[in-house]
Image (tube, rainbow, N blue to C red):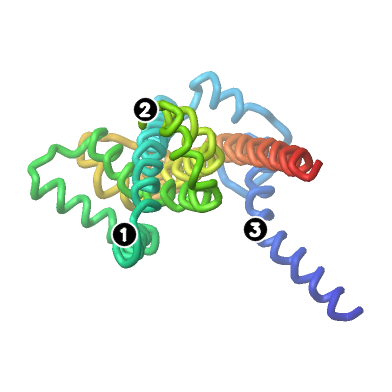
Amino acid sequence: MMKKVLAKCYLWLLLAMLYAPLLFIAVFSFTESKVLGSWTGFSTKLYQNLFTGGVSGGSALLAAVENTLLIALIAAAFSTVLGTVAAIGIHNLKGRKKQTVQFLNNIPMINPDIITGVSLFLLFVFLGVSQGYATVVLAHITFCTPYVVLSVLPKLSQMNPNIYEAALDLGATPAQALRKVLIPELRPGMISGFILAFTMSLDDFAVTFFTRGTVGLDTLSTYIYTDARKGGLTPELRPLMTIIFLLVLILLVVINIRQDRANKKVKR
């Protein structure tokens, strides 16, 4: 009995440590105070400022949000395509070749972000590539693709290996078999990989910081870093963080509901 109580207390303590900061930011997004932790009365002015552009340096903040979302979408889309093709290739390898390639695919995920960022920075400098939007997107595609590979490979292992061959025997071209047989089977893994790549790109700071150059390109993470170095954070960041958290929460709830319904259909 005592063990169960302690286990529950530990679980709730862990959840409180994880979600208390988010709740704290959400609560103080409904006050006009510029200092986080100072309550000056309930107000939705920060939300109004965020959506109407009435932010101190609002154009820079909105541009950072736009850059963040656009880079994440482009990087996730390309990573999903490249990662799916790579996963199919890895799955068809045999023996040590397969193990070696899988090991090489895992290195970028284990490698610290700062090392990846510095390495890509030096590579772009060596190649004489001007750093900016394109280099940031290429860098994000580089470190996101292995996560897609990792998401798609299990689906390939679960798939009946004879389906693709059967499609070819029935007259389908390799491209048709890929589009009509493989892709539908791999779609759950591809969607998971896309969401994971999008999240990793959205969250990245180190790689972006080292590959954006000096053109003034800012994503949300680099904007917050620059803003914090000035001595404080823009108050409108609080409602922005709250909205992002709620969107992610809603997305996860929808995905879990759909997954539960799919599992119930399979059981029937």
User: Which label sits on residue 101?
Assistant: 1
* Labels 3 and 1: the sequence-earlier one: 3
Label 3: which residue?
A: 18
The residue shown at (65%, 41%) is: 252
CA gap between label 3 and label 1 equals 36 Å
Mark 2 = which residue? 173
For marks 1 and 2, give the CA distance. 27 Å
Q: Would residue 133 appear left or right of 254 to someone viewing this image? A: left
Tell which of 60 and 135 is nearer to you.
135
Q: Are marks 3 and 1 in contact (CB under 8 Å)?
A: no
Amino acid type assigned to the residue bearing label 1 in the image: Val
Secondary structure state at the residue bearing disc 1: helix
Q: Could you tell me the amino acid type at mark 2? A: Thr
Amino acid tagged 3: Leu
Query: What residue is rendered at 45% in x and 53% in y?
Result: 150
On the image, the x and y values in percent for residue 96 come to 31, 67
Tell me the distance, in whole angstroms, between the alpha carbons under discs 3 and 2: 51 Å
| CB-based contact (under 8 Å), mark 1 and mark 2 | no
x and y, in percent, of residue 66 in the image = 42, 28
Dot 1 or dot 2, earlier in sequence: 1
Estimate how packed mark 2 is, as few (under 14), some (14 to 19) or many (20 or more) residues with alpha carbons within 10 Å.
few
Q: Secondary structure at mark 3?
A: helix
Q: Which mark is residue 252?
A: none
